[in-house]
Amino acid sequence: NAGVTQTPKFQVLKTGQSMTLQCAQDMNHNSMYWYRQDPGMGLRLIYYSASEGTTDKGEVPNGYNVSRLNKREFSLRLESAAPSQTSVYFCASSEGLGGQRDGYTFGSGTRLTVV
Amino acid sequence: QKEVEQDPGPLSVPEGAIVSLNCTYSNSAFQYFMWYRQYSRKGPELLMYTYSSGNKEDGRFTAQVDKSSKYISLFIRDSQPSDSATYLCAMSEGRTGGFKTIFGAGTRLFVKA
């Protein structure tokens, strides 16, 4: 099925460890996003890439870095994980920036626990 | 105060009931209004979008926007157990706001058979 694929689906890290969350879309979308979802907080934008070759900070970028590897792939890296980064992470893509008309297509999420 | 407020629920209704889900917001510049549905352990999926004020209908779903009251609603008619999910409202200014989309925290809905 066409869509957004995220790996891994689950991960447990120790404080201070690093890891990279992978995301790939096969819909030829220009824009890609990383969100985190926490109870009672809604989805909060971490970083986004309006098009291949560009990345920008979102609402909560501290502690994260991103790479838009090509049009299909957008990765999120935690350099030194902290318990506050325990969350569910969603990658999303859209044809145009913001996805107002066509919406975002989300992946199934990565459940990350930092102990 | 959050830019977008949404009652977290849970909201429990019997099968066949009409469901009303709502969000309020504070930013009068929002022009695009969206509803996403999120099943447990899945990513959100776009259900409906509305530009500016007015109503939009799609099958059993109706989205309403009242910009004067800064209030949006999603109505589900003849609710089914398969409608049990978390419903997220989302809003955006569009180009003037840098295309940022603000999401509500979501309302959990349970439809009992």
Image (cartoon, rainbow, N blue to C red):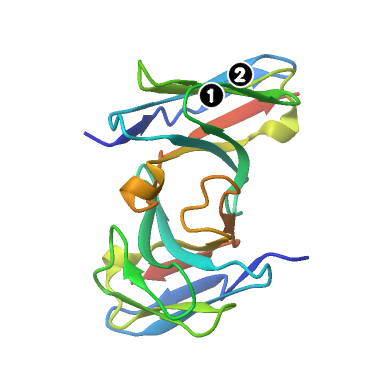
Residue A56 placement: quadrant: bottom left
Residue A64 placed where, x, y %?
31, 74
| Crowd class of label 2 (few under 14; some 14 to 19; many from 20; radius 10 Å) | some
- Left or right placement of residue B30 versus residue A2 in this view: left
| Residue ID at (39%, 49%) | B95
Q: Is residue B78 above or below residue A76?
A: above
Residue B9 placed where, x, y %?
46, 27
**Mark nearer the viewer, 2 or 1:** 2
**Mark 2 or 1 closer to N-term?**
1
Residue A62 placed where, x, y %?
24, 69
Q: Amino acid at mark 1?
A: Leu
Q: Is residue B87 above or below residue A69?
A: above
Residue beneath disc 1: B11
Q: Is residue A5 above or below residue A94?
A: below
**Could you tell me if the residues under marks 2 and 1 are in contact, i.e. CB atoms within 8 Å?**
yes
Residue A28 placement: quadrant: bottom right
- The chain containing the residue under callout 2 comes to B
- The chain containing the residue under callout 1 comes to B
| Crowd class of label 1 (few under 14; some 14 to 19; many from 20; radius 10 Å) | some
- Left or right placement of residue B61 versus residue A61 in this view: right
| Residue ID at (59%, 77%) | A72
Residue beneath disc 2: B19
